[in-house]
Amino acid sequence: MHREKTMGFLWIALGICFLWDPIVGVADFLPDIIGWLFVAVGISALADLNDDLAEAQRTFRRMLWVGLARVAAELLIFVFLGNTSDKLNPYERPVWTLLLAFSFAVLELWFLLPAFRSFWRGISSLSECGGARNGLATPNRRGRSLCDRMATVTVVFLLLHAVLTVLPELTVLTVFRREGVYNTALYRYRDLLRGGAAILSGAAGLAFLAFWWYCYRVWRRETAWIDSLRVRYEREVLPNTGLLLRRRVRAGFTFLRVGILLSANLSLLYYEFLPDWGSVLVVLCGCFVLGTLMQGSSMLVGVGLSVAVVGIPRTLLNVRYLRDYVPKASLLDPAAYERYFPVCVLASIEAALTALFVGCVLICVMRMAKRYGAGEDAISRMSAERDMQARRRRANFIMIFTMFSACAKIAEVFLQPRYGWIWLVQFALSMVVFVLFNGLLTDVTESVCGAYPPTGHEES
């Protein structure tokens, strides 16, 4: 049976489903970062056919970093400031919430308003593909097409979403202190205003979803137009092997970079920002994107699953321990020590397996560099061999610092109850590993992409 294809619009529609929900303070119940990821993936095929859509895709990719920053801000607000609230001014945390909510609202408007204008302008341009207008570009009685109306609806929703997110948090600015007594003024109604703003924002989001659903139905009905776009894509883009290879390598290596970066043990009050097994899963996503380009991926999957099998129980035991005891309790209370010791053992095994996993990643990357960096003549082969020797030395340095980082992680697990600052040692070593690993991946990317240069397309 012929499977209907929509040239990525289904992915875009799924991404919008993560963007409509209201944000209360900095709490986003449906993470926007997942929505931006789906939108960036869905628009990739269309971006090869239109410059406006290519510009929109670049902006949506930048929004992924904004989404990561939002996740970090939520961790800061709910974990760090939440656990130190007894040492802070009672209104210091709401001020930080206002600052972060306002900052992210401004960032989203700064990036998304031009991004969605470019998106709908590109869709309107592609809707005349083949010289015929379809339902997306057909004007109504007022001379406005569906793309024009969707652009207006999107701008209105983004503005309402930003205003309703920030407005309740502004009440903290009405708090003032007189003779040692806080006058809360409008701040006492902040929760009520948050509820009302969430209802209004949710209603606007549901209306936004309804418009997108209607647009998606119109898109699906235009089968002839979708077929013409697919034929054009197969004729203009698919034969360009160098372009597709470069994008695949860069996308896969981006996951590898993010995974290695997140392996750094950033700890806030003994809670990890992301456990080692989480960073391993990110690297495995990069291996999945690279596919057959990454030889030995089965080895990576085996070691990565081993890290997850050990790391997930360790994370659960650590959370259970921190719910019942303070971190230093293992030094004084035998019952707490018995609860904490399995965490130490599993964390040590996880650190060793993570170091082994990084070594396997290095082996696969070096195999890729050797496979695609070989020259055709004698001079090119000699140059490629010298480059490989330099990469091997760099890989050896990476592995040495990885082992140091694993040892520091093991020492941290046992000594953190006594020395709370010791996680900084492992964090610094992980940053060294990331810098060296990033340089190696950049070198391999240039080598692989240089062997198959793109033709006829500018790199986006």
Image: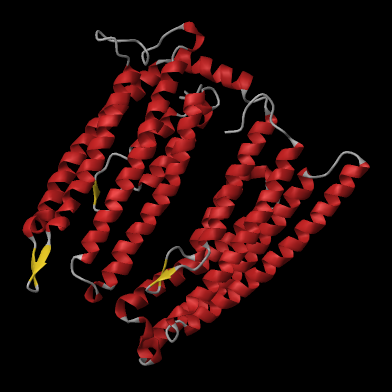
* Vertical order, 425 against 257 (above or below): below
Residue depicted at 51% across the width and 24% down the height: 51
Residue depicted at 56% across the width and 77% down the height: 408
- Locate residue 353: give its quadrant: bottom right
- Locate residue 11: give its quadrant: top left
* Vertical order, 114 against 448 (above or below): above
Q: If the image is split into quadrants, where does the C terminus sit?
A: top right
Q: Is residue 274 left or right of residue 252?
A: left
Residue depicted at 62% across the width and 64% down the height: 433
Q: In x, y percent, where is residue 189?
A: 8, 55
Q: Is residue 72 left or right of residue 304?
A: left
Asked whether the viewer can see residue 280, the reply is no
Q: In x, y percent, where is residue 80?
A: 32, 68
Choose between 36 and 323: the one closer to the eye.
Answer: 36
Q: In x, y percent, where is residue 292?
A: 68, 43
Residue depicted at 16% across the width and 44% down the height: 197
